[in-house]
Image (cartoon, rainbow, N blue to C red):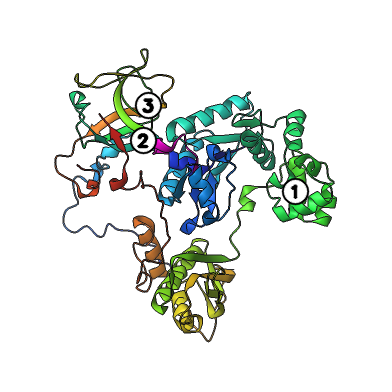
Amino acid sequence: MYALVDAVAFYASAEKVFDPSIRFKPVVVLTNNDGCICAVCPIGRRLNIPKFQPYFKIKHYLTQHNVVVRSSNYELYADLSERMMTVINRFCDDHYVYSIDESFLRFTGFSNIIDDWSAYGHTIRQAVWRETGLPVGVGFGPTPTLAKAANHAAKKLSGFNGIAVINDESSRKNILARMDVTDVWGIGSRLGKQLKFMGIKSALDLAQQNPKKMRRMFSVVVERTVSELNGVACLNWDEVKQNKKEIFSTRSFGERISDVTTLKSALTTHAAIVGRKLRKQRSLTKRIVIFAASSPHEESYYKKSLLYDFPIPTADTSVIAKAVSRVIDDIFKPNVRFYRCGIGAMELESELYQQADMFSVSEDKPKIMQCLDEVNKRYGVGALSLGGERLSQNWNMKRAFLSPHYTTRWSDIPIIKCD
Amino acid sequence: MFVIPIFIEAGITGFESPAAEYTELGISLDELIIKHPNATFIGLASGQSMQDVGIFDGDLLVVDRAENVNTGDVIVASYNGTFVCKIIDKSNRLLISASKSYSSVYISPEDDFKLEGVVTTSIRLHKNKVELSRCMP
């Protein structure tokens, strides 16, 4: 048996944990730089607030309905996520954290101990609610895809109250028939459109397809999904999480910038982020793309991106930052109000299988990078950084509606009234 | 030629510490005070109503959400939109202040009320901490 446990509107629910004044109000959370809505609490959903809408477009509607707006408080979410995962971890010896608010549990040899999965789900749900203040939904199924489907049912379909179990034909068919095919794990909106065009509308429709035919028409992944929907486990989360083939670090600026020094320091910071991510998965990059652009809403849209090839693959922050210094004058253009910039590492190679080059010597200094990573791991990202990174702070994320960091900063701990 | 490596105790000059065999981990306040790390949060007391149980304005409260709540416990609850610290009387649905000059509050069904956790420890700082400067009066 598998289970998928995930938080209900995690970011919005996390905002409510330490702020009782907004618990019974509609709450939305905005993405980086307060651009779009990325989470809507259940009370807000009743107002039909659409997700992934630019904030400025529905600002008026939100004010009208007294909706509480918050910027993404990642410091708080990270702490609450860790607490939630540690509680869930108590309930199964095989636990895989899939994202900040989702985790899979694989129960092997539990059939003699647990006869009522629904009751077990309630126990998990209550423990997380009581100990962290976060509401979670739990779905059980014989495969990861069915557990994910049950989790969807637990939260979105009527008749389930946060828990759903698929453990026989009738529960499987009942849930899959009421589920849109695009809500199946791994079926994106584009693929969903094609399937619907073929008359495959519900998850059950997809389950009834011939897996071999699906493989021929689409891919091996769709074939596996069909098998999974029929109770044959073939997806493994260890396989799902492969090393990334490209690593990007991009962000829009809190304020527009138009001087070369600030742009350079922003790109240098992206260089550091890309370097850190490369080292984490033990990869090296042969080629990076460096880009900067103005807002597409602006009259004279400007975008420039340059490819930069390294003679020897690298994962060294200072080597990548040097590439930025070399191309910055070609990217920068006076009088442009830059809105976003970034760096992407392409053509990644494993650090392990490197052929030495007879004519050029690597500039990487792995020991310094290891030291940098360890200092930052211990004292927080940014504790040690390149000189070029922090020339200016104002390109950092704009978070105008940020709540306090209740659990990670002494100055922000919640006030408890004794009046 | 074969070399057989023999590790010798280098590094110690002079006498070996007679305490070396007795080293233990240092004592930790977290270990003593926080029983359920995932379920515990720290808040700042504000007000005088709990002075008779020794909780003063500006004290730190260690709140454990996993601890069982019994009548007579010092608890933190969310009550109509704010966190409050009181003594709970479960059978009579009362929030009682420690100081007699404050009257008890009856929790009616119309109130937004939720028990958050038990105050297992309170901490008084006898010297101001800059880290807490925002909350200090």
* Image point (49%, 65%), residue name: A252
Callout 3: chain: B
Residue A220 can be seen, yes or no:
yes
Query: Label 1 is placed on what type of residue?
Result: Arg
* Image point (54%, 42%), residue name: A9
Q: In this view, does A139 lie to the left or right of B40?
A: right
Residue A317 can be seen, yes or no:
no
- The residues bearing labels 3 and 1 have C-alpha atoms spaced at a distance of 45 Å
Q: What residue would you read off at disc 3?
A: B67
Query: Label 2 is placed on what type of residue?
Result: Thr
Circle 3 residues within 10 Å: few <14, some 14–19, many ≥20: some
Q: Is residue A18 left or right of residue A41?
A: left
- Figure check: B83 above or below B136: above
- The residues bearing labels 2 and 1 have C-alpha atoms spaced at a distance of 42 Å
Q: Which of B53 and A368 is in front in this view?
A: B53
Q: What residue would you read off at disc 2?
A: B40
Q: What residue would you read off at disc 1?
A: A224
> Do the residues bearing badges 3 and 1 touch, measured as CB atoms within 8 Å?
no
Circle 1 residues within 10 Å: few <14, some 14–19, many ≥20: many
**SS under mark 2:** strand
Q: In this view, does A95 lie to the left or right of A368?
A: right
Query: Label 3 is placed on what type of residue?
Result: Glu
Magenta region: which residues? Answer: A17-28
Q: Quadrant of the C terminus of chain A?
A: top left
Horizontal and vertical percent position of residue A263? 43, 74
